[in-house]
């Protein structure tokens, strides 16, 4: 188990730990690409946090600040935020862009389980 895989908490991914913590994860990983100035990002944050608790032990949930970690954002061609990418076995398995409902996020996660 990695240092970031804690019960129901939202991990904080960076350019430095992304490959190990996301691409190398044994679990599917939902990554919320966001920025501090982004209103829609703030609007979905409570849903992302709730899903981290609901899927604890089955899916790792984390956030990556695109302003502080531009290399990873560029690597995955993040053009708009919030962008939620679901990774499974080191590959992008699904993506949602913009404010979505909690049900939409659940559907995205369920596709990887």
Image (spheres, rainbow, N blue to C red):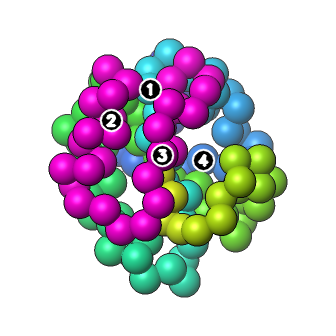
- Observer-side mark, 3 or 4, equals 3
**90 w.r.t. 33: above or below:** above
Q: CA distance from mark 1 to mark 4?
A: 14 Å
Near mark 2 (Cα within 10 A), the count class, few <14, some 14-19 or many ≥20, is: many
Q: Are marks 3 and 4 in contact (CB under 8 Å)?
A: no
- Element under disc 1: loop
Which image quadrant is residue 24 in?
A: top right
Q: Are marks 2 and 1 in contact (CB under 8 Å)?
A: yes
Q: CA distance from mark 2 to mark 3?
A: 10 Å
Q: Is residue 98 a member of the stretch shown in magenta?
A: yes
- In-front residue for pair 62/82: 82
Residue at which label 4 appears? 13
Residue 24 visible, this angle: yes
Image position, residue 81 (x, y; %): 54, 68
Residue at which label 1 appears? 28
- Element under disc 3: strand
Image position, residue 98 (x, y; %): 43, 67
**37 w.r.t. 11: above or below:** below
Q: Horizontal placement of 43 versus 32: left or right?
A: left
- Observer-side mark, 1 or 4, equals 1
Near mark 4 (Cα within 10 A), the count class, few <14, some 14-19 or many ≥20, is: many
Q: CA distance from mark 3 to mark 4?
A: 17 Å
Could you tell which of marks 3 and 4 lies nearer the N-terminus? Answer: 4
- Element under disc 4: strand
- Observer-side mark, 1 or 3, equals 3
Residue at which label 3 appears? 95
Could you tell which of marks 4 and 2 lies nearer the N-terminus? Answer: 4
Q: CA distance from mark 1 to mark 3?
A: 13 Å
Numbered label attached to residue 109: 2
- Element under disc 2: helix
Residue 50 visible, this angle: no
Q: From which residue to which does the magenta span run? A: 85-113
């Amino acid at each position: 188990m990695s240092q970031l895989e804690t019960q129901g908490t939202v991990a904080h991914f960076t350019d430095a730990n992304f490959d190990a913590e996301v691409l190398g994860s044994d679990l599917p990983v939902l990554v919320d690409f966001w920025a501090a100035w982004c209103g829609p990002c703030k609007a979905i944050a409570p849903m992302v946090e709730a899903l981290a608790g609901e899927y604890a032990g089955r899916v790792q949930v984390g956030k990556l600040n695109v302003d502080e970690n531009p290399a990873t954002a560029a690597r995955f061609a993040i053009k708009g935020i919030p962008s939620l990418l679901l990774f499974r076995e080191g590959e992008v398995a699904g993506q949602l862009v913009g404010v979505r409902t909690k049900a939409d996020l659940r559907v995205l996660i369920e596709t990887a389980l």
